[in-house]
Image: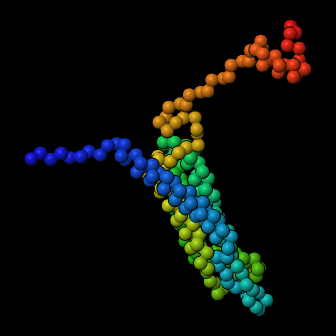
Amino acid sequence: MEYVTAVPHPRSEAPGSARAGRMSLAVALLCGALGAAVALLATRQRWSEGTVTVAGGPYPLIAKGSDVTGVPAALAIVGLAALVAVFAVRRAGRFMVAALLALSGAGTVAAAVLGASDSSALDEKAAQASGDTSATVQALTHTAWPYVAAIGGALILLAGLLALRYGRLWPGMSGRYERGGTPRPRRKAPAAADPDRPEELWKALDRGEDPTGA
């Protein structure tokens, strides 16, 4: 008895690829935009706080994310720009932009995690408040906002990974070419109106022109 192996027709795989492209595109756009927004918001919040002794008493100090490090905010903006630019390029260019998007997310995560335990910003503020360059912050505590920024970076990273994996299935901004790469046929210019036609003569009279004039 002979066994016949069924070979899937190429057309049967197209709907699945199109569905995966649409789904990955929606998830990447959501993750990239949300991740950039979360990272930017987190860098504006209080990351650490402490005190320094000034005139015999404690003086409160606070440091926002932007005081600790400007890397997460900068990379979040780069990632957001790369998310938009990925639709303006194709093939190798799209791969490079998608890689930049993923690297922006990874860098945001790393910078946020490193900034979670950083005390240099508060040490600098302690030296300025006390007038003593050797003064350091006391009773140092950290908030959860650096890790919120890291979550935002992780979302950007996920968007970049999706772009690397499924970016070839995503549409581009240019509408000149069809999906198969064939240029769209150009529309023919409308034929010039014949001035001797009756309707054109009436239109000329309506405009106050003399249709019989040379």
Q: Position of residue 125 (x, y in %)?
A: 72, 76
Q: Quadrant of residue 205?
A: top right
**Where does the C terminus fall, quadrant-wise?**
top right
On screen, residue 55 versus residue 165, left or right, reads: right
Vertical order, 26 against 92 (above or below): below
Q: Residue at x 57, y 53 (%)?
A: 83
Q: Is residue 69 visible?
A: no
Q: Say which quarter of the image contains residue 156.
A: bottom right
Q: Is 180 or 76 nearer to us in this picture?
A: 180
Figure colour scheme: rainbow
Residue visible at 78% across and 19% down in the picture: 199
Counting from the top left corner in percent of width and height, residue 194 is at: 74, 15
Q: Residue at coordinates 87% horizontally, 22% vertically from top-left?
A: 206
For the residue pair 151 and 191, the one nearer the viewer reads as: 191
* Location of residue 143 in the rendering, given as x and y in whole percent from the top left corner: 61, 80
Residue name at image x 89 percent, y 17 percent? 209
Across and down, in percent, residue 115 comes to 59, 72
Could you say which is closer to the camera, residue 189 or residue 124? 189
| Residue at the bottom extreme of this rendering | 56
Q: Residue furthest left?
A: 1
